[in-house]
Amino acid sequence: MGANCVPHARQRNLLHRAQSNAQAVLRDFQHYKGRAADLEARTQQLLARIAQALTKFPPS
């Protein structure tokens, strides 16, 4: 493994952490039963962007 793998691994790990946090936030918003629909939608968009970003890195 080259030196370039370390930054990529770190970025991938941070994206996975962000994904986990966003999923937890989305679960919390679901308790509002639609009153946080805008925030739910924005969180789902964020999750989609994170998933897209993760495709740029090889699996660990």
Image: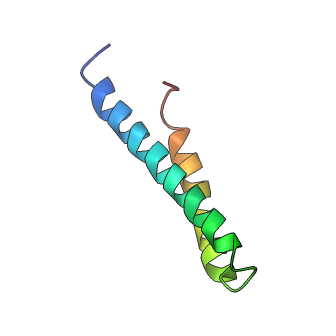
Vertical position of residue 41 compared to residue 14: above or below: below
The answer to whether residue 37 is left or right of residue 46 is right
The residue at the point 48 percent across, 24 percent down is 60
The residue at the point 37 percent across, 41 percent down is 11
The answer to whether residue 10 is left or right of residue 23 is left
The residue at the point 50 percent across, 56 percent down is 21
The answer to whether residue 2 is left or right of residue 27 is left
Q: Nearer the viewer, residue 36 or 41?
A: 36
The residue at the point 70 percent across, 71 percent down is 30
Q: Nearer the viewer, residue 26 or 10?
A: 26
Residue furthest left as drawn: 3
Vertical position of residue 21 compared to residue 30: above or below: above
Give the quadrant of residue 38.
bottom right
The answer to whether residue 16 is left or right of residue 11 is right
Q: Position of residue 25 (x, y in %)?
A: 56, 65
Residue furthest top as drawn: 1
Vertical position of residue 51 compared to residue 26: above or below: above
Q: Position of residue 23 (x, y in %)?
A: 59, 57
Which quadrant is the N terminus positioned in?
top left
Q: Position of residue 34 (x, y in %)?
A: 74, 82
Q: Nearer the viewer, residue 56 or 12?
A: 12
